[in-house]
Image: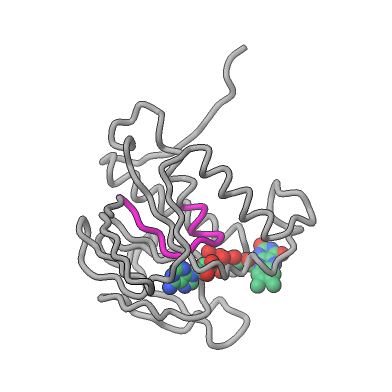
Amino acid sequence: MRYDVVIIGGGASGLSCALTLASAQGRGWEWAENRRYLVLDTGRSDMNRALFKNVPGVPTGTLGTELIDRIKEQIKGFGGVDFVEERATKVEGSKGSFRVYTEGGKIYESEYVVLASGFHRFDIECEGVKVVDNPKSPKPGRVMVEHYGDYKVREGLYVAGLLAGVSSMFTAAAGSGVQVAINILSEWAGKPVVIHDVPEES
Ligand SMILES: Cc1cc2nc3c(=O)[nH]c(=O)nc-3n(C[C@H](O)[C@H](O)[C@H](O)COP(=O)(O)OP(=O)(O)OC[C@H]3O[C@@H](n4cnc5c(N)ncnc54)[C@H](O)[C@@H]3O)c2cc1C
């Protein structure tokens, strides 16, 4: 199966990336139409253990599990995103012709790949990825993937969330996922893109 973007990891950063990509549809932008996105996830987001009191705009006391469900519902409202519960094991290829392999033996082809699998470990075989200690983690043993400028690891390959070295705060992780989505959309558009909605005039 072929996708425009495969996102590995469906936590704060991966879901935020998917939401922004999906929200580009239906705006008369020809380059954003008929895109297909895939989120591959093993369901072990740090959000599962969180009770949020400091996420801007999110009601104090929201469970991380509730927030995951809400973001997924938001994404489904736009459409174009498939969710598959499976572990990615290997990424090979280059921009336009990546292949993402899963533990269950599936292979997904994709123009872009976003690594958003958190900072606990990085055990995906992936050429050109340099894994280093994560300096923003208060606990030892956490990792990040080196990137240059705006989360790009190499052409077509981006990293987001704690794996990109942002602090372990929901909004920081989500923001990096959004930035990666905007970077990809801007590459397709050939110019800087933002996605803003305004109230309908009454
Ligand atoms: C106990 C706890 C409480 C917290 N409380 C707060 C708080 O109050 N406020 C706040 O702002 N932040 C809080 N956080 C931090 C916040 O939850 C994280 O910063 C955020 O979830 C990180 O997002 P991420 O996308 O980088 O990683 P995650 O959300 O951890 O998502 C990574 C996803 O990748 C998946 N994955 C990993 N490897 C693979 C693979 N090979 N293939 C497919 N999928 C894979 C995992 O299953 C996971 O779903 C808390 C965290 C914890 C642990």
Answer with the quarter of the image where residue 128 lies.
bottom left
Q: Is residue 96 above or below residue 191?
A: below
The picture places residue 85, in percent across and down from the top left corner, at 48, 63
Q: Is residue 112 left or right of residue 182?
A: left
Task: Pinpoint residue 4: horizontal percent, then vertical percent.
Answer: 30, 50
Which quarter of the figure is the N terminus placed in?
Answer: bottom left
Q: Quadrant of ligand 1?
A: bottom right
Q: Indicate the quadrant containing the C terminus: top left, top right, bottom left or bottom right.
A: top right
Residue 54: percent from left, percent from top: 73, 57
- Residue furthest to the bottom in view is 140
Q: Is residue 34 magenta?
A: no
Q: Which stretch did the figure color magenta?
A: 4-17
Judge whether 67 appears above or below 8 on screen: above
Most distant residue in the front direction: 104
Residue nearest the observer in this picture, 9 or 107? 107
Q: Residue 7: say if magenta.
A: yes
Residue 170, by quadrant, is bottom right
Q: Residue at x 46, y 37 (%)?
A: 195
Residue 201, given in percent of the width and then of the height, sits at 58, 14
**Residue at x 29%, y 40% (from the top left corner):** 191
Tell me if residue 117 can be seen: no
Residue at 33% over, 37% down: 32
Residue at x 32%, y 66% (from the top left corner)? 106
Instruction: Determine whether 118 is above or below 191 in the image.
Output: below
Front residue of 14/135: it is 14
Inspect this view and state whether residue 106 appears. yes
